[in-house]
Amino acid sequence: MFAEERREQILLKIKKTGRVLAKDLSEELEVSIDTIRRDLTYMEEKGLLKRTHGGAVTLSKVRRLPMDDKIRYSDGTEHQNAVAKIAASYIEEEDTVFIGNASIHFIMLKYLPRDKTFTVITNSLRVAERLKDFNNIESYIVCGKIKSEEGIVDALATEFVRNLRIDKAFLTGGGISAKHGLSSSTPEGAIFHKAVAGVSRRKICLANFDKVGTEFFSKTLDINDLDIIITDWEAPDEEIEKLKQQEVKVIIAKEI
């Protein structure tokens, strides 16, 4: 099999499954793992996929369709759980924190401390509903037009949040890169989360491996506006090094 034929097979597989592992491709295509890694590097340079530690994932479009609620409000992947668990550990007694409407925010709820009293600001009806079960948490929901895929992010919500002061904001987005910063699928979402960051003392970004090195439609924040980025063990090393050069603290979650 010629290199172009092999790469075409890899591309078809990744489009079908969303993710490939180098060791599996090596066995399936009967070539060395180094050959597969070179293929993946070449294909990434051509803008066909995005490399990860163990293989590659589909290259995201700059805008993403709304996530199905069954996926958004699920138990999450091992990567999401690892990142969410570390994020929750940053909450301290009497903190006021922002937790949004992303899937990783919903996963984070199961790791929230039960032995500390703190306040949560959210723009998510689903998160607010779940927080009613926590006796140690005082919760507030941002007011504005309800928009399920991003939570409440309209102009009214943005103006509301500008009047608050927050200790820690747990932020996320469609992608994060050293060049483009943290970015979102929509300008409305980017503007709202920029306002949240503007009233927050510490900005903590939750970014699984598939978000790292990815650039979405609307920029939310520069990298140096963030204090901490929490990602996982499959995040691409090259992009991690670029992020660290921006003088932001990067924490790599391990498998749990």
Image (tube, helix red, strand yellow):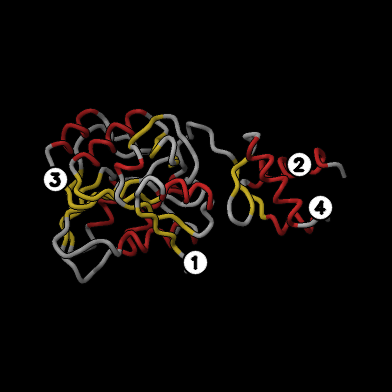
Amino acid marked by disc 3: Arg
Residue on which the image places disc 2: 7
Amino acid marked by disc 1: Glu
Comes first in the chain, label 2 or label 4: 2
Name the spot of residue 141 as percent of width and height, x first.
20, 45
Relative side of 53 to 166, left or right: right
Amino acid marked by disc 2: Arg
CA separation, marks 2 and 4? 10 Å
Name the spot of residue 25 as percent of width and height, x first.
74, 54
- Assign a secondary structure to mark 1: loop
Amino acid marked by disc 4: Leu
- Assign a secondary structure to mark 2: helix
Comes first in the chain, label 3 or label 2: 2
Residue 165: mark in rendering: 3
Q: In the depicted view, which residue is nearer to us: 40 or 107? A: 40
Residue on which the image places disc 4: 29
Residue on which the image places disc 1: 255
CA separation, marks 3 and 2? 51 Å
